[in-house]
Image (spheres, rainbow, N blue to C red):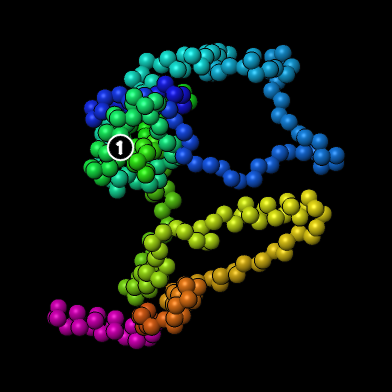
Amino acid sequence: MTSEYSVASSVNGTVPIHVASATENHSIQFHQYQLADMGRVRVRKVCDLEDREVTQSEIGKGYEYAKDQVVPISDEELSDLPLPTAKAIEIQAFVPLESIDPIRIAEGYYLVPDGQVTAKPYKLLVQALSRSSKVAIAKYAWSGRERLGLLRIRDDVIVLHAMRWPDEVRDPAAVDPPCVGGSDEEIDGALALMETMTRDNLDGPEFEDAYTDALAKVIEAKREDKSLPEVQEPDRPEQVLDLMAALAESVSKARASRGEDADVHDLPEKQPAKKAAAKKATRKTAGRKRSA
């Protein structure tokens, strides 16, 4: 995105803004090397017709209209598309946040007022969104395509989240699992586990990036020619055959990890199979007597 963007709405007119990334990538990046001599392996851009490497200044975008016809498209042409959203983030509607399926929400960016003059109309939109308890749905152009976006407030700053179009979300029916329901007792057990594991926030070591930390230790050990850190084998859970027993064990472990009483008293006992079958047969017999 460029600093030439603006937020357009009937609430505050048009507010020039520039975009700042709202997230950071702290993952460790790798390059490719030839293992024999650790020489860097690079990707070179070669023209198919001339069979030679080309520089970046010789490369542009093109659309393959047919196998023997390519239509060149320049960056200037993309920036001057005949769209009202080409230079502005056009607000289309205001909706409750809970009405948006989270699967449609993608990466986020901070929208920053472009200068002191635009601070007041920017603040007006911030206050209006905050008091309404709603989010704004907008359209904008980015990387050669029109996008749908969600505007929300985070600590008095407008955040723009890219959104997926409805047809970009797959139908859950395509991956629908077998329809096997649980009993009331099993559902109560699952709810008890959820209650035990409920948190007020996501602060704590269990929500930190352990993978990057472990990878950094491996790199440091190899750099100093030391032995690699010992691998901690994770506990491999057994196949769940008795769901109630598994739920009770999970609740017990969750409580113990939080320093609470590990004994589980509030999970309903699983009804013996024979007794349940007998009660079911009794209900069927009673039903036949009533119908008679």
| 230 to the left or right of 5 | right
Residue at image point 56% right, 70% down: 237
| 73 to the left or right of 157 | right
Range of the magenta residues? 272-292
Q: Position of residue 272 (x, y in %)?
A: 38, 85
Q: Is residue 166 above or below residue 90?
A: below
Which residue ends up furthest to the right in the rendered image?
A: 37
Closer to the camera in the image, 269 or 207: 207
Q: Amino acid at mark 1?
A: Val
Q: Quadrant of the C terminus?
A: bottom left
> Is residue 150 something one can see in this rendering?
no
How many numbered discs, if any? Answer: 1
Closer to the camera in the image, 199 or 123: 123
Magenta stretch contains residue 189: no
Q: Quadrant of residue 89?
A: top left
Q: Is residue 263 above or below residue 176?
A: below
Q: Position of residue 199 (x, y in %)?
A: 40, 63
| Label 1: element kind | helix
Q: Main secondary structure of the magenta part?
A: helix
Residue at image point 30% right, 40% down: 135
Closer to the camera in the image, 152 or 47: 152
Residue at image point 46% right, 17% down: 78
Q: Position of residue 66 (x, y in %)?
A: 53, 16
Residue at image point 34% right, 30% down: 119
Graded by Cα atoms within 10 Å as few (under 14), some (14 to 19) or many (20 or more), the crowding at tag 1 reads some
Q: Position of residue 53 (x, y in %)?
A: 73, 19
> Is residue 265 something one can see in this rendering?
yes
Magenta stretch contains residue 274: yes
Which residue ends up furthest to the front in the rendered image?
A: 116
On the image, numbered disc 1 is attached to which residue? 126
